[in-house]
Image (cartoon, rainbow, N blue to C red):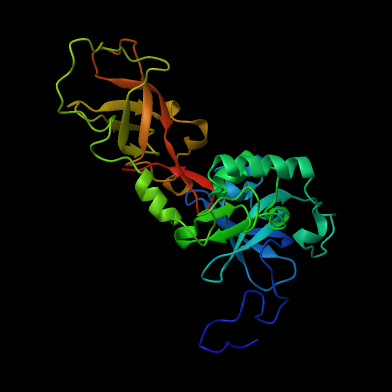
Amino acid sequence: GGPVPGGLPPPPGQHGGPQIRPGEVLQGRIARFYPAKGYGFLTPDEIDEDIFFLRSELPKDLQLTQRHEDVVSQRVEFEVRIMPDGKLRGQRMSLLSDGEGKSRKSKDEQLPPLEADLVDEMIDFLVEHGGGCDYGKFSSHFAKVKKQQLKEHFDIASFDRGVQRIELPEGHPARTEGDGIGGGEEPEDREEREAPRDDDEGGDDADEPIDDDELSIPSGPQCTPTGRIKNYDPLKGFGFITVEGMEEDVFFQRSALPSTFHAKKKSEMPELCGVEVCFEEDMSNHGGRGLRASKVNLLLKWHGGDRCFLLRRT
């Protein structure tokens, strides 16, 4: 149970408790949850180590709550992921009743094998993507399939920054030369190659002259301007949006935000300053008090490493 040669810490679960394998399914209770920060900690039944989790891994019924008391003490079943630094992370959580069993189960012991037709569909999908693709993209397409079920049929590897890829296995008849995790370009090289360039079409054209044929589009539903939140005070219940190129800021009230962001305490809210938004302009007359937004939509970005959406910030 002590340090292994080279000064590295012992593997997860070896601090006097059972060893944990990647993909193992455990049960326990949610010990702490911080709604404003979007994460918390689980206390498993059989190991003496709290496990970190992100809001996006909560059961669907709890993901949008801003009250920690709705989450803390809930009994859940969850899958264990071992991060590159050896720390444990909980994911794919589901609610349990207090009466449900506490036996420790391995994921590969309880999951059925994949049907042949489904495997063929997955192979076709990977072939269409050059023999392999980002694992997050694959798992979004085949949402009900677990990683342990895939390992019998495909190669899955992790790279830096939490990026994972799934590939056709070596020697597979549908795999062409140059495919594979060990060959070709790394995911980060592909990201750099596919990233939009400054001189690509659709880049920033704020300083470009406007074509005479370009129409002026009035804002309205489904034609919404974008900006970023300059400031917002949860206690006072209002804030302002800055729009690039506009001298005047756009006023909005708490009621214009999504309902899950109506908390009146900063401790119960994520920081909204700097968050990118699109908004619907309030066209009613408010006595000439300036531009106002009647509805504010918060823009999100996908984080592949943690498989969740985050607020998009500038």
Left/right of residue 114 with respect to residue 48 in the rendered view: right
- Locate the N terminus by quadrant: bottom right
Residue positioned 24% across, 39% down in the render: 198
Q: How many marks?
A: 0
Note whether 69 is above or below 106 in the view shown: above
Camera-side residue of 166 and 141? 166
Task: Find residue 173 and report its horizontal and vertical position in percent.
Answer: 65, 50
Query: Quick check: 174 above or below 202?
Result: below
Q: Is residue 97 left or right of residue 240?
A: right
Q: Can the viewer see residue 42 in this picture?
A: yes
Q: Which percent across, then down, holds residue 59? A: 66, 45
Q: Quadrant of the C terminus?
A: top left
Name which quarter of the figure residue 118 lies in.
Answer: top right
Q: Residue at x 85, y 59 (%)?
A: 101
Q: Position of residue 233 (x, y in %)?
A: 35, 39
Q: Residue at x 49, y 58 (%)?
A: 162
Residue 200 horizontal side relative to residue 155, left or right:
left
Residue 76 seen by the camera: no
Q: In this orientation, which residue lies closer to the viewer: 256 or 115?
A: 115
Q: Position of residue 174 (x, y in %)?
A: 63, 47
Residue at figure coordinates x 53%, y 59% from the top left: 181
Q: Please say if 105 is above or below 240.
A: below
